[in-house]
Image (cartoon, rainbow, N blue to C red):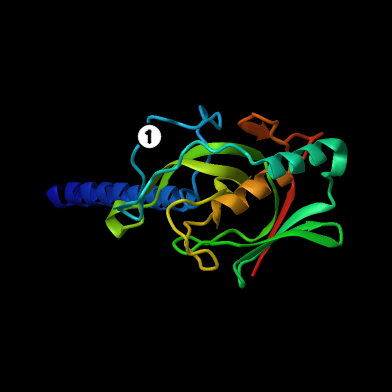
Amino acid sequence: MKSFRFLILLALFLSVFVLYFSARDIVDKESCGCGPPLASADGRYSYNEELAIFNNEVVNYRLAELAPSLDILSTADEAVLGTISDQRWIEIDLSDQKLYAHNGNNIDYEFLISGGKWSPTPKGEFRIWVKLKYTKMEGGKKENNTYYYLPNVPYVQYFYRGYGLHGAYWHNNFGNPMSHGCVNLSIPDAEKLFYWTSPLVSQGGWVAYSSKDNPGTRVVIHD
């Protein structure tokens, strides 16, 4: 009788053990990428954030609130006049670590990027679903030195769940994989792209969501 009870308790323990690690594995898989924007995210600069961490190390964080330059505002004004359409789309070549901003038969921009190193960047065809001028990103794991806590990440454009295009102030190694799944750009390049794509962020605005009538710019990612 005692051995029978012992077997039952052992079976229950093993079941709980399997469920725990299966759930943790699912959470880990879903935490790849930059992390989706918080429900409270409004795209505004957060002045009370003074610490930034990338892969368990404190990084030099001296980002001031950014104001768009006059040439960027000019590009945004052109978009308001109707030049943004399905003729504009973004191609990301992970093999070359480059981004191409197509406009019909022309390429308006060509930028070096940093794709996924610690988690893969998703491949396929997507559309930008929300744009935030700033947002906080947190993820990774402290136990394997991939934890990151990055406030005020600038010019963020989410295209698939928590994966997005955005500026990076914590490294300057563009052209090489350096992200946890997102697509990193230099801040000046991310700014240009932010005001080039749809949905449009109004002058002085902080956030824009796509809609059925105003779909986000198409993003195609491949090797």
Name the residue: 43% across, 47% down. 27
Depth check, front residue: 198 or 40: 198
Q: Is residue 58 left or right of residue 219?
A: left
Few, some or many residues within 10 Å of mark 1 (<14, 14–19, 20+)? few
Q: Nearer the viewer, residue 186 or 221?
A: 186
Q: Nearer the viewer, residue 207 or 223?
A: 207
Residue 97, compared with residue 16, is above or below; it is below
Most distant residue in the bottom direction: 95
207 to 129, vertically: above or below: above
The answer to whether residue 200 is above or below residue 141 is above
Query: Number of numbered discs present?
Result: 1
Q: Position of residue 209 (x, y in %)?
A: 68, 34
Picture residue at 63% right of the left edge, 65% below the top: 98
- Hey, which residue is sitting farthest left in the picture? 2
- Quadrant the C terminus occupies: bottom right
Q: Position of residue 20 (x, y in %)?
A: 33, 47
Q: Residue 188 or 200: which is nearer the viewer?
A: 188
Position of 191 relative to 132 (above/below): below
Report which quarter residue 114 is drawn in: bottom right
Coordinates of residue 48 in the picture (x, y in percent): 38, 30
Q: Amino acid at mark 1?
A: Glu
Q: Position of residue 158 (x, y in %)?
A: 61, 45
Q: Which residue sits at x=22%, y=47%?
A: 9
Q: Which residue is the site of mark 1?
A: 49
**In this rendering, would 36 be left or right of 158?**
left
Classify mark 1: helix, strand or loop: loop
Give the image quarter of residue 206.
top right
